[in-house]
């Protein structure tokens, strides 16, 4: 089964990327893998504190995932899987793609502010020609109706 890989982070544009991935998966008989990366700067503390912070980060990610997963199951009939990795986001995204041969498309949300589309879109689009899967970049301000129309 072909899976859509979508990144769960704290960005506003993440929502449209999630919606797009779920709608495309539902319409094509695919699956959705939701990847969340805990960056190393969140875990740079003494070992005991680091373990507590890791567990807090995982709990926060799992709570966010459950919101998206419920919507995907209820509205799109797609049961997503959650993968949590630790490290630099771009490196971990690429590692997930390499490790899961069923991933067929990487879905990213593009930011709408003046600073640009966001660090993941910027960094990954620079290397798009060498990636093993295509990237779909979903505009952050795309309306729900327009999003449904293009999926």
Image (tube, grey):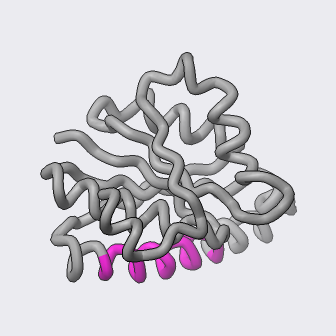
With 91 as the anchor, is 42 left or right in this view? right
Residue 98 within the segment the image draws in magenta: no
Q: Residue at x 39, y 79 (%)?
A: 66
Q: Residue at x 79, y 70 (%)?
A: 49
Foreground residue among 3 and 92: 3
Foreground residue among 40 and 20: 20
Q: Residue at x 66, y 66 (%)?
A: 54
Quadrant for the C terminus, please: bottom left
Q: What stretch of residues is rendered in magenta?
A: 56-71
Majority SS type along the magenta span: helix
Quadrant for the N terminus, please: top left
Foreground residue among 12 and 95: 12
Q: Is the residue 27 above or below the residue 15 in the image?
A: above
Q: Position of residue 2 (x, y in %)?
A: 23, 40
Q: Is the residue 104 above or below the residue 10 in the image?
A: above
Q: Which corner quadrant of the image does residue 44 belong to?
A: bottom right
Residue 62 within the segment the image draws in magenta: yes
Q: Position of residue 81 (x, y in %)?
A: 32, 59
Q: Which corner quadrant of the image does residue 69 belong to?
A: bottom left
Q: Residue at x 55, y 40 (%)?
A: 93
Q: Position of residue 118 (x, y in %)?
A: 73, 53
With 97 as the anchor, is 91 left or right in this view? right
With 99 as the anchor, is 129 left or right in this view? right
Q: How many marks?
A: 0
Foreground residue among 80 and 141: 141
Q: Which corner quadrant of the image does residue 73 belong to?
A: bottom left
Q: Position of residue 100 (x, y in %)?
A: 35, 35
């Amino acid at each position: 089964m072909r899976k859509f890989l979508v990144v769960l982070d704290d960005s506003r544009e993440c929502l449209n990327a999630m919606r797009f991935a779920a709608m495309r998966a539902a319409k094509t008989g695919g699956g959705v893998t939701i990847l969340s990366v805990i960056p190393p700067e969140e875990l740079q503390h003494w070992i005991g504190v680091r373990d507590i912070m890791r567990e807090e980060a995982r709990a926060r990610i799992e709570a966010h995932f459950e919101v998206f997963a419920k919507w995907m199951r209820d509205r799109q009939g797609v049961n997503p899987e959650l993968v949590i990795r630790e490290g630099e986001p771009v490196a971990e995204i690429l590692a997930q793609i390499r490790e899961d041969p069923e991933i067929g498309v990487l879905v990213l949300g593009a930011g709408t502010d003046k600073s640009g589309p966001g660090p993941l879109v910027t960094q990954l689009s620079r290397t798009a020609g060498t990636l093993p899967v295509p990237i779909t970049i979903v505009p952050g301000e795309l309306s729900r109706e327009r999003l449904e129309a293009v999926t």
